[in-house]
Image (spheres, rainbow, N blue to C red):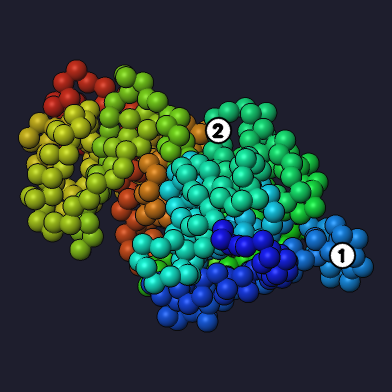
Amino acid sequence: MAQLKKEDEIGFAEKNAFWAVNPLEWVKAIFGDNIRKMPLSSKLTATGLSRQQEKALLDWGEFLAAKIKRSLGGELTARELELSGKIGMSIMSGTGTGKDTLAAIVTWHFMFCFRFPKCLATANTGKQLKDVFWSELSKVQSWAVKGSDDPEALNELQQAFTIQSELMFANLPANKGRGQRWFCRAVTINVKGSQEEQGEALAGRHEDYQLFVLDEASGIPDAVFKPVEGTLTGILNVVFMIFNPTRTTGFAVRSHYEEKAKWVCTRWNSAESEIVKPAHIENLARYGLDSPTYRSRVLGLPPFADKNTLIPMDWIIAAVERGREREIIPLESDPLIKGCDIGGGGDKSVNIGRKGGLVHPPRYNNAKDSTVVEDWVAGDLDRDAADGAVVDVIGIGHGVFWRLHKRGYNVRPGDARRQASDPDRFYNARAQAAWRMRERFEKGTISLPEGCQDLVDQMGAIRYFPEQKNKVQLKSEIVRELGHSPDDFDALLQTFYYEDDVFIVKDRNKTDSKFMKVFCR
């Protein structure tokens, strides 16, 4: 492409006109057999892409063709008329299906096939944008076929385009001195900014050929989307949106429901993808086929708004985002409380710290010997200078608790069977602790550490029963349903068995003697 001679430009333009509305044929021409050489590609189609990816490219090409034909004043069929009135494609998908790879391919196709295009890419976080999507652009660029056997030679995409940290632009002679017109730019959203500031992120951009790529769009604030439609005024101005539906509301989800008429919509089920390993599906199926985890991460569907879900998934995801943006800053006076779920019967032991509304990442220990677990818990308390801990005392945790107490640690028992301090409202101490935790999520005063997917999945699977004094599922019930212990959830739950201020003591290594006398009776 970068080495075209003048006499070849007419032929190349004709070929580009074909590729512009046939992106799958462009993939075959530009990448040849290279995608098939990538890991996991042996079971895929002739191009090396999954069937889901190929079908999306065919649909995308049909959509582009209708938009271009309309802009040129061509006579449209009923199908073309329908497609030409849409603003873009929205892919709602389970995890691991290769949607980021497809977004990168769509971006390269647009940049390659149209003259002086402008592409703006954004995502729910700067990390997703730079570490995932922008990285995927570089990876896909490297797949293009080389015109030489020289291992140092550049392929066609590498010759024609330069990728920088936040900008990818054309090196073509036609773009000489006009680099501000033929480019793709990474645009980071300020999630803490005002709606006006967020709305300005993608606003005010105009070009004949313009593509907006929205990665993990379910986490992008609604305010970002509002001005986009107002910018879609050129010959071909379109949106390509991909997301895993972790929320039940928002612009991205509405594109598949209330506003479906505006979009070319497709949903990818991870269980139907050749890319996703069966073990991944089986692991998520443990949470139940109707669970928020399975619906979102496998089926590519928004979580059900189940009235019996203890903490709705929207609240959980919002807490993860607060953790990512470090929005929760605890007071210096807030005690650091450790919740200790002591494993038994082969389950691992888990410690999770919480200081005010700031939840720390969990730590794990797989030892079966309770004395080893005891020493591990003690070391964890010492390392973080914790003000106290609540230890699960059911099963082998009882002995761990007592020995920690005798060693002088400020530990209190987390006994789900004990009566709640408000027995008229709560079934037992577990239900009361769960409600304290639920209120934190409802009020938005708690954050979860990013990357703790087990904690998120377990939390989204827990149910409660208002007709039974807000009874929360017993651990045995959850194990029976999920096939494993919700140990991360229970470790965090331990930190809510008592009001935080009971851990504010002058000597963190001395347990409240009056409390111990009551517990020991």
Amino acid type at image mark 2: Asn
What residue do we see at 70% from left, 69% from top? 11
Q: Quadrant of residue 14?
A: bottom right
Looking at the image, which is closer to me, 142 or 228? 142
Q: Quadrant of residue 73?
A: bottom right
Asked whether the viewer can see residue 460, the reply is no
Quarter that holds the N terminus: bottom right
Q: Is residue 378 above or below residue 15?
A: above
Tell me the CA gap for discs 1 and 2: 37 Å
Q: Which residue is mark 1?
A: 81
What residue do we see at 38% from left, 48% from top? 451
Residue 152 image point, x, y percent: 36, 62
322 horizontally vs 67: left or right: left
Which circle marks residue 190 in the picture?
A: 2
Amino acid type at image mark 1: Leu
Residue 58 image point, x, y percent: 67, 72
Asked whether the viewer can see residue 69, the reply is yes
Looking at the image, which is closer to me, 150 or 18? 150
Q: Check disc 1: other Cα within 10 Å, few if <14, some if 14-19, many if 20+.
A: some
Looking at the image, which is closer to me, 246 or 172? 172
Residue 429 image point, x, y percent: 36, 42
What residue do we see at 47% from left, 44% from top? 164
Residue 504 image point, x, y percent: 26, 22
272 horizontally vs 8: left or right: left
Label 2 near label 1: C-beta < 8 Å? no
Between tags 1 and 2, which lies in front?
A: 1
